[in-house]
Image: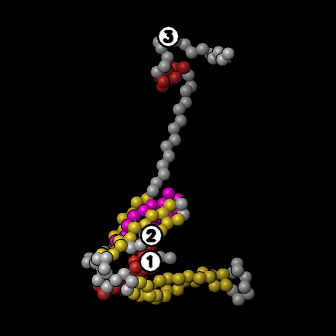
Amino acid sequence: MNLDERDMKTNLEALWAAFERHGITSCTLTYNGSGDDGSFDDPVFEPEEGDSDGRVSIIQERGEYKYDSGGDWTKRTFVTKRVKISLSVKEACTFLAEDWLGRHHGGWENNEGGYGTVTFDPSDRSLVLEHTEYVRTSNEYEHVVQSPDALEKLAGVLKENEVLPEVLPEEE
């Protein structure tokens, strides 16, 4: 589920503060997906000695089905709620990168899929998404020969004054 703009902004502010507290100057995540499956690689932090296991509190939206009191599973409602959770900086970066990617390229892991990077840069408080979609193309061609003249023009195989036989001889 994608966070609303207010929650995304709140989460980024918390992450920038955590980067500063834990000595992190940048974080980059790569991802790749296709065929209805995709994943993020572990975040890469600069400097490497920055504390990516430090904690940060972020807002997450969770959903669940609520059933009527009679237990009829067909009479259900999907209910979402916002909760504040504590994650490691590493987990928070992955969570926010997945959310950001889903906002801009939902379905990036489906069909031919895509790949790219998400970079968090606290120096200018930027979140940069570089995404490439895999695309399968097809080209369809149809060639129709309707007469010996057309064949001559298309293929250039008939010599001047040569006539095609009406019926080809059978092979022996």
Judge left or right: residue 168 versus residue 13: right
x and y, in percent, of residue 58 in the image: 42, 85
Q: CA distance from mark 2 to mark 3?
A: 68 Å
x and y, in percent, of residue 25 in the image: 28, 78
Name the amino acid type tagged 2.
Phe
**CB-based contact (under 8 Å), mark 2 and mark 3:** no
Crowding at label 3, few (<14), some or many (≥20) Cα neighbours within 10 Å?
Answer: few
Name the amino acid type tagged 3.
Asn
Q: Is 123 or 74 nearer to us in this picture?
A: 123
Query: Dot 1 corresponds to which residue?
Result: 95
* Numbered range of the magenta stretch: 104-122
Query: Dot 3 corresponds to which residue?
Result: 161
Judge left or right: residue 159 versus residue 76: left
In terms of sequence position, does the residue under pointer 2 or pointer 3 come before the other? 2
Q: Is 134 or 106 nearer to us in this picture?
A: 134
Query: Dot 2 corresponds to which residue?
Result: 40
